[in-house]
């Protein structure tokens, strides 16, 4: 089966073989995961969201030493240390930067001037248009089913992808609900040039997440995750004791301030990196119900690609 | 392009040309809409949810007089008058019955014994398996993006369809987020045999909804609907003044009882049939953002089918 033209364009943009991008996730995606995905022909991303500038520099350098193929870094733009993170990207000559959680116009011009390919993550068409105006090369459109932080409009992948594809004329990468060749092809049918996959790679061997976190993805059922903390920044997580506390507070009408106190600091580290089931924030996508095994990242890439090719039999 | 084998099976089951099913919606789908969709080669459904037994009998008789092709009736099973509704179906020899909002094992045996084809609407795999055990011929799997009443797990079409297809071995009809040939093909790629389309047909010429309701679908943007009333039965509706009142109450921690008082009776009639923007419940799917025109139902069916056929170009 031939790739759609927009998918070929996306592969050319990143110089990758398959339009499969591994999400740059906090506490999961260090250099080991990013290098493994890129080596396998997809695009690996280091997740800077859980790294200090020095730690990020170390991961970039390790990734460069491990592989000569392209990889990228995902940078949430809302941290106080973002300027220092951007400085590291420029010094280390990172070629591909995915930005999220902030205004794309703040950093895109500087990154583009330095020769970077820039992609911004959005959850609605308004932000997609803003990103295009800021000069990004592509957008990731992330649906309601995705793990971690999420948009306020609760637009699902099924509705969001066609809307964003109509709103912009740069390639659209679909995120949320994708874990295999079947869901990758469905995203392409909806108009996506490629896919960004988080939860399935969070449960890969090279993921730096705690083994208990990976096991929780494999064990997850269809009702295991929920979008919560909507009075702050909405986040999809597994329903653990911390989630239950948030639910009780929200159902009783807790204010944003009270919820911020309850959330405190370091919850995602506690959950994803330390495997603390009681107290942590376990950021996992709804598609965890479809992930049944912890595998090497390369095997995941190749399996998805083989499944995608098999899909052509459906209509012939 | 050839239909997937499970889609051919579904068309044979209903004796229809296209695997396009019009949702049996309250206050929208009387005999005019059902007959128009069936005449065009899809499957039209009369929505019994907003009808007394006598009114339903009238609509069935009108439908029979208008067309000789198959049509069906959608029956929510949780009403006090459900036995009388079923009695009408049997007396009028309705051949296709879609049931929802209730236990499929209560009525399926009797309907099957009378020679009916029975389909049950589900929102998760547990209910899908129960429906299969009850003996239904197919299930509708309805995602979080759908308008009106909705499942508690908030499973999106993108995650729900592959899960349900794996859980049962009867045909799965996808609902939620589908409005055109592109989304129909994506649903099939995810494993669906066919699609059930609500919002787009609610905005058809033959829909019995108030003109203001149809206009609100055409005008809807990506952030116009939200799933609410989760302490009662979750329902997706347009954000109107009534929705705002519910939001204020929920954010302040209102109890289920207080919300039931606020909801009162007859809200969907007020919204959908009477066009009361202030006080009504305007049950609309997220996909309204992708519906731009009120068209005759036959034109909608033929447009979707033509778009679906055009999709083959994507991978060739």
Image (spheres, coloured by chain):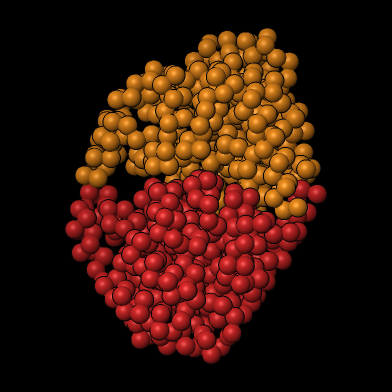
Chain colours: A red, B orange
Picture residue at 77% right of the left edge, 33% below the top: B12
Q: Position of residue A278 (x, y in %)?
A: 34, 70
- Look at the image and tell me in which quarter the N terminus of chain B lies: top right
Q: Where is B33 relative to A10, above or below?
A: above
Q: Position of residue A37 (x, y in %)?
A: 58, 76
Q: Where is A87 relative to B44, above or below?
A: below
Q: Can see residue B309? A: yes
In this view of the protein, which residue sits in the foreground, A11 or B47?
A: A11
In this view of the protein, which residue sits in the foreground, A162 or A155?
A: A162
Picture residue at 36% right of the left edge, 76% below the top: A86
Picture residue at 33% right of the left edge, 64% below the top: A106
Side of B228 where B44 appears, left or right: right
Q: Where is A106 relative to B67, above or below?
A: below
Q: Can see residue A271? A: no
Q: Quadrant of residue A257?
A: bottom left
Q: Quadrant of residue B311?
A: top right
Picture residue at 31% right of the left edge, 53% below the top: A230
**Number of numbered callouts drawn:** 0
Residue sticking out furthest to the front: A113
Q: Position of residue B78 (x, y in %)?
A: 48, 29
Q: Position of residue A43 (x, y in %)?
A: 57, 72
């Amino acid at each position: 089966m031939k790739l759609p033209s927009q998918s070929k364009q996306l592969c050319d943009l990143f110089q990758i073989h398959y339009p499969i991008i591994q999400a740059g996730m906090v506490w999961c995606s260090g250099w080991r995961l990013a290098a493994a995905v890129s080596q396998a022909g997809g695009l690996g991303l280091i997740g800077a969201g859980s790294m200090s500038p020095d730690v990020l520099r170390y991961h970039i350098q390790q990734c460069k030493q491990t592989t000569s193929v392209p990889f990228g870094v995902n940078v949430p733009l809302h941290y106080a240390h973002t300027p220092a993170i951007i400085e590291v990207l420029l010094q280390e000559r990172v070629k591909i930067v995915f930005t999220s959680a902030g205004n794309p116009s703040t950093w895109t011009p500087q990154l583009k001037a330095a020769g970077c390919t820039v992609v911004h993550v959005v959850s609605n068409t308004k932000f997609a248009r803003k990103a295009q105006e800021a000069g990004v090369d592509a957008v990731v459109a992330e649906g309601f089913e995705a793990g971690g932080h999420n948009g306020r409009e609760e637009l699902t992948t099924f509705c969001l992808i066609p809307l964003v594809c109509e709103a912009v004329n740069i390639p659209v990468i679909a995120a949320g609900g994708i874990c295999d060749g079947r869901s990758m092809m469905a995203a392409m049918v909806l108009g996506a040039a490629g896919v960004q996959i988080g939860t399935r790679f969070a449960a890969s061997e090279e993921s730096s997440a705690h083994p208990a976190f990976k096991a929780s993805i494999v064990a997850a059922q269809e009702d295991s995750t929920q979008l919560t903390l909507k009075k702050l920044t909405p986040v999809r997580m597994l329903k653990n004791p911390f989630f239950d506390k948030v639910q009780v507070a929200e159902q009783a009408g807790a204010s944003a301030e009270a919820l911020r106190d309850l959330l405190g600091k370091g919850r995602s580290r506690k959950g994803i990196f330390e495997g603390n089931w009681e107290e942590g924030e376990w950021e996992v996508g709804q598609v965890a119900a479809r992930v049944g095994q912890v595998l090497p990242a390369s095997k995941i890439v190749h399996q998805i690609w083989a499944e995608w090719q098999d899909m052509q039999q459906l209509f012939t």
